Image (cartoon, rainbow, N blue to C red):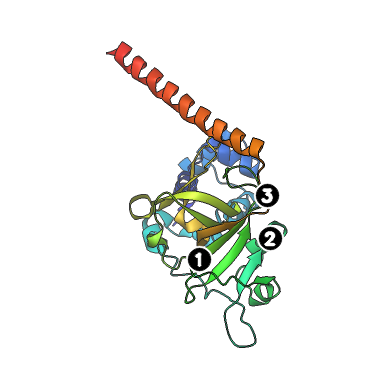
Amino acid sequence: MNFLGSNIRFLRKQKEMTQADLAAKINVNRSLIGAYEEGRSEPRLNTIQLLCSYFKVNFQDIITRDIINSNEESQDLEGSKLRVLPIAVDQDGGEQIILIPQKASAGYTQGYSDLGFIENLKTAQLPFQELATERTHRIFQIQGDSMLPTPSGSYIITEYVENWRDIQNNECYVLLTESDGVVYKRVLNEIEDRQKLVLQSDNAQYSPYSISVNEVLEVWKAKGVLSFDVPDRETYHEQVNNKVMEVVNELKMEVKRLHERLDTN
């Protein structure tokens, strides 16, 4: 039985994409996506291959498997289907803390499950009592301004999260994802009802977005931040003033929305 059309629609909506979004991704006209989903047209072989590559599904599955009704069974809400986490140990058998600098992030996306790749990364010693000795830790270097006031170039000390249901709302995490690689965000846990995580930036200029739990490969809870970017007095006051202005602007917008609701009533 051919489930291709309904599977394309389901996979597209699962990623919260419009037909135009998907058409742009695989370089076809938007009207063709509608025709595929409604069974009015069959995509060419190379188009099906592009769809399989983008949605990360098997060629045969996208055509013959009812992904909609079997998807609930495939949801990995706890990360339990992941491979055993590869770690590096010292000569005494003690677990080492792996350092993933920004320049190694792209490689980590591909080699995260490869013990040889992990063992070739640099390691660090952090004798801090705040880090539980029985847990696995890693250090990720971040880039960009989306998590200001944590500056670009900072090193995030993290602890491995084995069960994704344990992700705590409004806490910061490093996530390894299929689509975006390594990201550092504040997370809202919507696994139970929507099988999604909402990722938020501390910088208000960036909008939050959600990802399917099936896109997540690893989750690491932020335990601390190391930074060599020491702010001077002017920079500190500028950051404080910017934060105050953000709060003032948010209050202005809320007052405006209240006035608009009163006017409509």
Residue 200 screen position, x and y as percent: 49, 44
Q: Which quarter shows the C terminus?
A: top left
Question: Residue 20: horizontal and vertical position, in percent?
Answer: 56, 35
Residue toward you, 90 or 239 = 239
Q: Amino acid at mark 1?
A: Glu
Q: Residue at x 52, y 38 (%)?
A: 35
| Distance CA(mark 1)–CA(mark 2) | 16 Å
As shown in the figure, which amino acid type bears the numbered disc 2?
A: Pro
Q: Residue at x 47, y 30 (%)?
A: 247
- Indicate whether 142 appears above or below 23: below
Image spot of residue 230 (x, y percent): 66, 48
Q: Decide: marks 1, 3 in contact (CB < 8 A)?
A: no
Judging by the rendered image, the residue that carries numbered circle 1 is: 159
What's the distance in space between the residues labelled 2 and 3, CA to CA? Answer: 16 Å
> According to the image, label 3 marks what residue?
229
Specify whether 251 is left or right of 123.
left
- Which residue appears at 67% of the width and 52% of the height? 153
Q: Going from the N terminus, do you reach mark 1 or mark 3 first?
A: 1
- Tell me, yes or no, if residue 12 can be seen here: yes
Q: For the N terminus, which image quadrant? A: bottom left
Q: Residue furthest top?
A: 263
Which corner quadrant of the image does residue 176 belong to? bottom right
